[in-house]
Every structure is written in structure tokens, then in C-alpha cells.
Amino acid sequence: MKKITNAWNWFKRISLLKKILLVGVVIVAIYLLIPKSDSSAEITYKTGAVAMGSVEEIVSETGEIMSTGKTDVTSTITGVVSEIYVDNGDTVTRGQALFEVTSGATAEDRSRAYSNYLTAKNNLDTAERTKNSNESAMWAAHESFESKSLDTELSVDDPIYIQTNRDWLAAEEKYLDQDAIISQAKAAVSSSWFSYQATIDGKVTAPISGTIANLSVSPGQEVTASQNAMVIGSAVETWVKLTVSEASVVTIEPGQLAKVSVDALSTTPFDAVVKRVDEFGTENSGVVTYNIYLVLSEPSSAIRPAMTVQVDITTQSKDNVLVVPNSAIKPYQGSKAVQILSKKTGEPLYMPIEIGIEGESMTEVVFGLELDQEIIISQSSSDSEKKSSVGLFGGAGGK
């Protein structure tokens, strides 16, 4: 401890220059004593031969089932099933009676429902008359605008021009807005009519022609309006809709084959055919997309409308062409190239090529390579380290 104290006192007494030199010597000594490692990266190239094969260009997108050829039949009456006229497997036509229901509604319920229907019908009549009145007011305002402003060639800044123009535009908007009111009134009439129908005895009829399946009602069973009673299957095709980008739509056309996987079903993909491609796109937040419509070749009874699907459309395909793995293709001088190993130096050399169809894992080579020619498929590097230690006075040792 005394030696350390004496050394520290000595260090404080020496000049600043000597202190700097001493600290520098200590730092160098510590650096030389730390073991070093000499690293050299060794690159290993994996090669493969150009082969003949098949390649497909595929556009993959998510879509949904639009229609399935199946229609749910619901009871339109709340009550008790009194008679059933069909069974599973029976063929029916549109409008044919399927089963009969005795309503459980009271006379008061029936009267109230009918009153609601009449009120909705009167509201519709009023809305339609109001539209006619709004149309007359609109043309009157337009005539006033023309006679007081346009015919007299008033300036657009003139108060009369401004007022008559606003009156005309307001009247026009009021007339156009009436269409939405009429649509709401029509919906109310339809809803109130079905509510009234649910209170009276009646027969439920087939909405489409087809074959009965999944019959779920029986005589004596209580049913409610909108309760599912059976399914009618028809020969209608199962349609799939998906949305693609501008870049993808130019490669898709009717007649192309596709594979459709239904997310909810653990089955093999269904074959499908592209039927329609939208000519005009839809813009949303500056992004333009296009709708594609496909039809399944063999529909399944397990598929339901609105189910999510994954669609792979084969836009191009070729057999018996030269192909190389996608990993072998490199960008080169604005085009494409592969690498080969020089026979003299063993170093990689670029060889320009012309490519065709680009698949998920393989790419067609149109020009620049020959069958069985060796090319670099991938490369990897490994570090080889050599540890060395240097003594304080320059002596070295290593392994």
C-alpha cells in the first residue's frame, strides 16, 4: 500500500509532458496484451445445372364466395306448422307451396300490424306527391333564375343573380333528395306488409326452382318469421369475386384456370375458371383496383355465401422450357444475368440472359444459357479465425 502511495505522489510531481507519455505507454501496452483474432471470410458457392421443366406465372389474391346455387327458405309466418307438402330430394318450382303455418297472433296483433302497413303506405303516397310538388318548385325557381338573371345578363356578383341562383340550386337539391325519402318509405311499406303477413295463416312458397334439402320443420313445430326451414339447391353456378391491383389485372383474362381454397374448409382446392374481368377500376384513397369474377368447376354443398377464399390464377404457363431457380437470377446492367464460376480463377462471372415467365420458384430462360450448364444457385460465407497474442515487448506466439 505504501508503494502505491509513493508511486502516486511521484506521478503528481512529474511534469505534464511526462504524465502524457507515461499514460500513452500504458495504453499501448494494454492494447498489445489483448488477444487478437485474424478473420478471413471464405465464400462457398452452390451450383446447379440448367434444366428442362415447367413454369407457371400465378396471381394470388383473397376473395369471397358471391353465390352458391343454394337458397335458404324461411318461414314468413309466426305460428305452428300445420302441414308440410315436400320432403328432402323433392323437385319444386318457383311459387310452389312448401308448408303451411297457422299464425299464433291475436286479433289485436293482426289489427295493429295491418294499421302499421296502412300508415306506411300513406307515408309513401305522401312522399311521392311531395316529389311532384318539389319538381314544380324546382322548375319555377329555374324559370325565375333565367328571367331575372340570365336574360338580363346580370353579373355573377349581382345580389339578384346570387339569390335566384341559390333558390334554383336549393330547389333542385330538395327535389333530388326526395328520392331517398321515397326509397325509405317503400322499404317501410315492404317491412310492414311482411309483418302483417306474419300474423295471418298462410302457405310458404318456393322462392326459386330446385331441389329440397336440409328440411328442418315438421307438423306441430313452432316457427317464427325469418326462421330457416329448408334449403333449395339449384343449378346456379358458384361464383367467386376478388379484387386485384392495376399491375395484376393486365395479366388476367377470361378463360384462365385457377385454384380456390376456402378458408373455412379443410379440403383440397377447388378448380375454377375466370369468367369476367372489370374494364373500369374503382379508386379508393388514390389506389385503383379491379374486380375479377370466377366460377367453380365443381361446386360443393359445404360452401356458403360470403366465405373467404384464397385464389391462385394461372396467368401463363409453359412446359419443356429451360428453367433456373429464382435465387440464381441477378440484376445486371439494367437487365438480368446469372453467375458462373470461371474455369481459370474460380471466381464468379456474370452471364447476361433473357428471361420469360417468372414462377414462384423457377424462371424461364429464353436466351443465354444451355441445357445442363452449371450456374451459381446461391452462396454462403463462413469466417475462419486465427487467435494470436503479442507480448509486451514484441514477442509473438500463435496457433
Image (cartoon, rainbow, N blue to C red):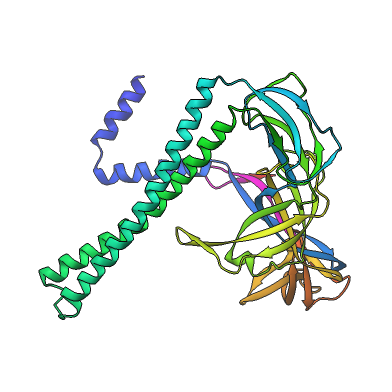
Relative placement, left or right, of 33 versus 123 is right
| Residue with the most extreme left position | 159
Q: Residue 371 location in percent, x, y?
A: 88, 73
Is 51 drawn above or below residue 77 in the view shown? below
* Front residue of 271 and 120: 120
Q: Total marks drawn?
A: 0
Relative placement, left or right, of 147 versus 64 is left
Asked if residue 111 lies in the magenta stretch, the reply is no
> Which quarter of the image is occupied by the N terminus?
top left
Is 219 drawn above or below residue 149 in the view shown? above
Residue shown at 50% from the left, 29% from the top: 113
Q: Quadrant of residue 217?
A: top right
* Front residue of 266 and 32: 266
What kind of secondary structure does the magenta stretch mostly adopt?
strand
Q: Residue 34 location in percent, x, y?
A: 53, 40
The magenta-colored residue range is: 378-396
Q: Residue 158 location in percent, x, y?
A: 11, 72
Residue shown at 40% from the left, 42% from the top: 123
Residue shown at 38% from the left, 49% from the top: 127
Q: Residue 73 location in percent, x, y?
A: 70, 36
Relative placement, left or right, of 85 versus 151 is right
Residue shown at 70% from the left, 53% from the top: 240
* Front residue of 221 and 35: 221
> Which quarter of the image is occupied by the C terminus?
top right
Is 226 drawn above or below residue 240 in the view shown? above
Relative placement, left or right, of 5 versus 194 is left
Asked if residue 385 lies in the magenta stretch, the reply is yes
